[in-house]
Image (spheres, rainbow, N blue to C red):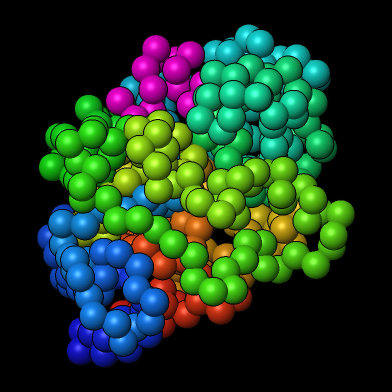
Amino acid sequence: MRRVREVFAHHLGESCGGMSFCVYRDGRPLLRLHGGSFERRESPADRIGRPWDEHTLAVMFSGTKGLTATVVALLVDRGLLDVTAPVATYWPEFAAAGKQRVRVAQLLDHTVGLVYTDPEPATGMLDVPAHAAALAAQQPLWEPGSRVAYHAVTFGYLVEELVLRVTGRRVGELLRDLVAEPHGLDLHLGLLPELEDRVSPVFRAPGYAISTFLADPRRRALVDRMYGTALLREELPANTRAYHASGLASGAGIGGADAMARFYSLLVSGELVTPRTRDLFTRTWSRGIDAVNDRPVAFGLGFEVQDELRTYGPVERAYGHSGAGGCLHGAWPDAGLGFSFHTNEMRGENTDRRAKDLLDALADG
């Protein structure tokens, strides 16, 4: 692991914030690296005030989707949900606008064609019921299942409402009761106020951009509708108490790299969901060039799976979920490993090599 430590130290030396990289096998740690600054610094040479350490929490953005997918997998394990069934079986209002045959799997594999909410509720992005109601009435942009495009924010509204209809409970409650507390994982979806002091503010590095593969201005307008003000507003909503408490199933998960690496290690070993259901959720269900973003993508059910860009390192089989700004959490099932790179410094995919370099070094041993 010497090379991994060297790569981590190199990137830490160029960081104005903090970062962690952790690796677990069979629920046990192989590597725990933490360092840098809890708060943003003007330059890497500035003195660190409060350190980023093993107790630091930060918003995971779309890294949350791997947690949400696992909650759904647990419902499948318990016989409460069938991914091949129409969504309207559980959520009758969803049958509107020709969606009566849309399957649960199409909500989870990003092929349903509801990439933004129309109309956008006046109550804002944190009003989950309002977004769910609007999406239930909405007509998809394409025939569900015919195209794949990342549903960055609406994924959470859709899956949250589905889970609520099946169980009467929110995803965050189920994550706490079925995953986090039983396994001692410091992961939160709906953060308690007494934990706020541990949450590092996230910030964008100079030049940060989203959808860096996209050049088409018409579809750039779709991206703006997809993300709304979530990532590009002057003040990031992710740094507010309201966002931390919201439990948004698409992007408001809060945790650290150590907990996420152990989470994926437990998923690999079959301790979170049965191997049969895990394999169902982590095989490839959709693959292609994102119909909005022009990026090669590949999805299981709620999880990302290894894509043409080798987002998950130099291995053939991998799954997990990335988060806006460079965080990456996942598993190499053939090696029995769970890993997580977590940071408060957001960089664009076109310039960020942190997780890529760390996974390359990990593969080298």
Quadrant (top left/top right/bottom left/bottom right) for the C terminus: bottom left
In front of the other: 307 or 18: 18
Give the residue drawn at x 78%, y 56%.
220
Rendered location of residue 203, percent (x, y): 44, 62
- The residue most toward the top is 92
Can you say whether 152 is above or below 75 in the image? Answer: below
Give the residue drawn at x 30%, y 64%.
39
Quadrant (top left/top right/bottom left/bottom right) for the N terminus: bottom left
Rendered location of residue 207, percent (x, y): 59, 73
Give the residue drawn at x 31%, y 87%.
45
Would you identify the image quadrant in which residue 3 lies? bottom left
Give the residue drawn at x 44%, y 47%.
238
- Asked if the magenta segment contains residue 164, the reply would be yes
The magenta-colored residue range is: 160-173
- Asked if the magenta segment contains residue 131, the reply would be no
Q: Is residue 139 left or right of residue 132?
A: right
